Amino acid sequence: MSEIICTSPIDGSIYNRRPTMAANVIDAAIANARAAQKEWRNVDVATRAKIVYEFKDAMLAMAAEMVPEIAWQMGRPVRYGGEFGPMTARVDFMSQYAVDFLSPIIPPDEMAGIERFVARDPLGIVFTIAPWNYPYLTAVNSIIPALIAGNAVILKHAAQTILVGDRFQQAFDKTGLPKNLFQTLSLSHDDTGRIISSGLVDLVCFTGSTAAGQVIERAGAGTFTNIGLELGGKDPAYVCADVKLEHAIENLVDGAFFNSGQCCCGIERIYVHESQYDAFVDGFQALTSQYVLGNPLDEATTLGPMAQAKTADIVRAQTKEALSKGAKALIDTSKFKADIGSGTYLAPQVLVNVDHSMSVMNEESFGPIVGIMKVSSDEEAIKLMNDSQYGLTASIWTTDIAAAKSIGSQVETGTIYANRCDYLDPALAWTGVKDTGRGATLSKIGYEMLTRPKSFHLRSV
C-alpha cells in the first residue's frame, strides 16, 4: 500500500495525504459498481437524466469551499472563481438532450411485418482517470453522460487534486443516485494499471499526457477494453491580414496565459501575417506585461503558480533552449517579484524570432509561454500549424468567416475556432487527432462513445 500526497504549489506544504486502497477493497468496489449498474441500466433515460442532474445543485452548494481548495491544490487564482459556469453548461446540455441522443435509430426504409431499430446499450463500468488542470470540467465530460447513458462510474482523480474526487462523491451522495453507482477511489498508478489490464472495466476515459496515454494503452492491450484518450496538445493560432487586431490580442493573451497556461486547448504558438506582425507583437507584449504573478489566494493575483515545480522547469528549459538558438524574450521577468527562477512561480513569457527547430514550438509546454512567428501567406500558416504531432484545437483570427472555414478544413485538428480560443462547446464533439488521442466526449457523439449499438430485427408471424 502506498500513499497519495498533494503538495500545494502555493508554499510547498503538504495539503492532503492519504493511503491508497488495498486490492481487496478496490475489487469489492468494482464488484459493487457492476451490481448497481445492472439495476440502473433498466431505469428509463429520462429518469436517469433527472437523477443525475441533481448533481449540479449539490456541487454548486459547495462552491464557496471549493474555490480556495482548488487554489491550494493546483494554484488557480481565487479571483476567477471555480469551473462552475462551464461545468453547469455541460451538465445542462448533456442532461437536456439525453433522451433524444440516446433514442433508438430507426432505418429510413420500412419493411412490411418487420420492426427494426438500433438501440444504445450502456457499456457497463466507465473508469474515468481525471487530470489536475481543470479537475472538475475534465471529469464532468465523461462522468455525467456516462451515468445518464446507464453506466456505473469509477473515478480516479489526480493526486494533485485528490480532494476534487471527494467533492464529486459528496455531491452524488446527496442525489437520488443508487449506492455504489458512482465511486471515487484512492488509487496508485499500479492499482490503475491492474484495473485496466484485468479487464474489470468496460471503458477507460483518460485525460493527460501522451506518454501516460501510451502506458494506459499498453495496460489495456489484449483486453479489448474501450479506451478514450485526450492527450497532449500544441494548439496554434493564425492571425490573418484582415484581423480585428485588438480583439485578437486580448483573446489570445488570455488563451495563452489563463490558468498559467495549463489548459488542454491553451494557445502555445501563434502565426501572424506579416502585415499585422509588428502591431500584434507590440500589443501582445504590452498586455502580457500587465499580469500580476503571486499567491492565488490574493484577489489581486491574475497569474498563480504552476501546479508543480517539475512542469515549471520544463518551460524554463524550453525558454533557455530557444534563447540559445536565437529567440528573443519580450517580457522582463525581473518585474515579476514572485518569479525567483525556480519553484512553481513562473512569469509569463513571449518569444519572437522562433522557429520549429525549437522545442517551444513543437513540444507541449503547458505553461505561461508562447512563441510568435511571422508568416507571409495562408498557405505558410497552414503548413506550420500542421507541423505538429498534436491536434486538439486551432484558431483563426479573421473577419472573413468563409476564409476561416476554408483554412480550417486544411488544418489537422479536432476543433477549429474563428475569433475565439480556449473554449469547449458541449454541443460539439471534444476530440483530437494524431498524438492528441482518440475517441470523443460531449455532444451526441459523446453518448455514442459511452454506449454500444444493439440492433433489433423483429419479424411478426
Image (cartoon, rainbow, N blue to C red):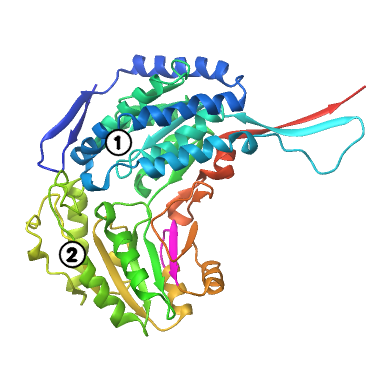
Going by the numbered disc 2, the residue's amino acid type is Gln
Judging by the rendered image, the residue that carries numbered circle 2 is 290
Above or below, 278 relative to 9 = below
- Find residue 37 and report its horizontal and vertical position in percent: 53, 19
- Find residue 458 and report its horizontal and vertical position in percent: 83, 27
Q: Callout 2: few (<14), some (14-19), or many (20+) C-alpha neighbours within 10 Å?
A: few
Point 18% across, 49% down: residue? 310
Above or below, 155 relative to 238 = above
Point 30% across, 34% down: residue? 63
Point 20% across, 67% down: residue? 321
SS of the residue under disc 1: loop
19 or 179, which is in the foreground? 179
Above or below, 164 relative to 398 = above
Image: magenta residue range = 387-397
SS of the residue under disc 2: loop
Judging by the rendered image, the residue that carries numbered circle 1 is 158
Is 433 positioned to the left or the right of 83 in the image?
right
Question: Which of the marked residues, 1 or 2, is nearer the chain's N terminus?
Answer: 1
Q: Is residue 442 magenta?
A: no
Going by the numbered disc 1, the residue's amino acid type is Ala
Quarter holding the N terminus is top left
Quarter holding the C terminus is top right
